[in-house]
Image (tube, rainbow, N blue to C red):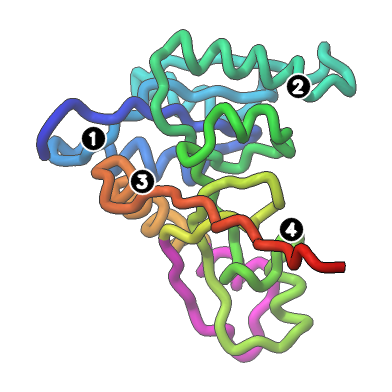
Amino acid sequence: MTGPKKRVAVLISGRGSNMTALIEAAQAKDYPAEIVLVVSNQPDAAGLARAREAAIATAVVDHRPFGKDREAFERALDDELRKHGIEIVCLAGFMRLLTSWFIGRWRGRILNIHPALLPEFKGLDTHRRALEAGVKRHGATVHFVVEETDAGPIVSQQSVPVLQGDTEATLAARVLEIEHRIYPEALRLVAEGRVRFAAAQPEIKNPRG
């Protein structure tokens, strides 16, 4: 590895199991990123204690005092990230939809993990919907965050078979194992500069009409 490690913040709202996978991966000497901050919008998120145990700085930016002013909440979040010199943001069970203001500030530097094989099953309840659709394979995707939910360029993706008799819980557990594997791999690729965000070319409208 050449050059300093990229400074990464992980945003969580709960237990942060993907956060833990990233922290563990980043402990390797040759890993190109360092998890230097964990931020939660929930003061009682279990993942905060895990981060502290790993000697990582934590911060709480509670969304509730901001009411419906999502951008004001994000400005406070942005201040916290910049205070710590963050270069890459990883969402790990962060249950807040981000506005175009925040995404614009961090474009090409925000990663998210989604429990489905995008572009299939965007949004919530992915395991239930996969079972209802009768798909043979399901999985997880790491992607760059853009304004449209779960629609950014894909960095990494892996699948598992959907087995006879699977429930939401059994399928979710199998997918979670994959999540913990591909998120550190995807962050490595981005931190090393081997994968870069490239915005789609703007659509050229027909001038006639």
Q: Secondary structure at mark 4?
A: loop
Give the Cα separation between the discs numbered 2 and 3.
26 Å
Disc 2: which residue: 71
Say which quadrant the C terminus sits in: bottom right
**Residue 128's spot in the image, x, y percent?**
75, 71
- Front position among marks 4 and 2: 2
Disc 4: which residue: 123
Task: Please tell me which of labels 1 and 4 falls first in the chain.
Answer: 1
Residue 9, image quadrant: top left
Does 55 appear above or below 190?
above
| Label of residue 187 in the image | 3
| Label of residue 81 in the image | none
| Label of residue 27 in the image | 1
Q: Secondary structure at mark 2?
A: helix
Please report contact status of discs 3 and 1: CB closer than 8 Å, yes or no: no
Q: Secondary structure at mark 3?
A: helix
Does 164 appear above or below 54?
below
Task: Please tell me which of labels 2 and 1 falls first in the chain.
Answer: 1
Residue 125 sits inside the magenta stretch: no
> Which class describes the residues within 10 Å of circle 4: few (<14), some (14-19), or many (20+)?
few
Q: Which residues are magenta?
A: 156-175
Task: Please tell me which of labels 3 and 4 falls first in the chain.
Answer: 4
Q: Secondary structure at mark 1?
A: loop
Say left or right for 124 vs 86. right
Q: Tell me which residue sits at (61%, 56%) in the image.
A: 202
Task: Please tell me which of labels 4 and 2 falls first in the chain.
Answer: 2
Q: Tell me which residue sits at (73%, 33%) in the image.
A: 99
Give the Cα separation between the discs numbered 1 and 4.
32 Å
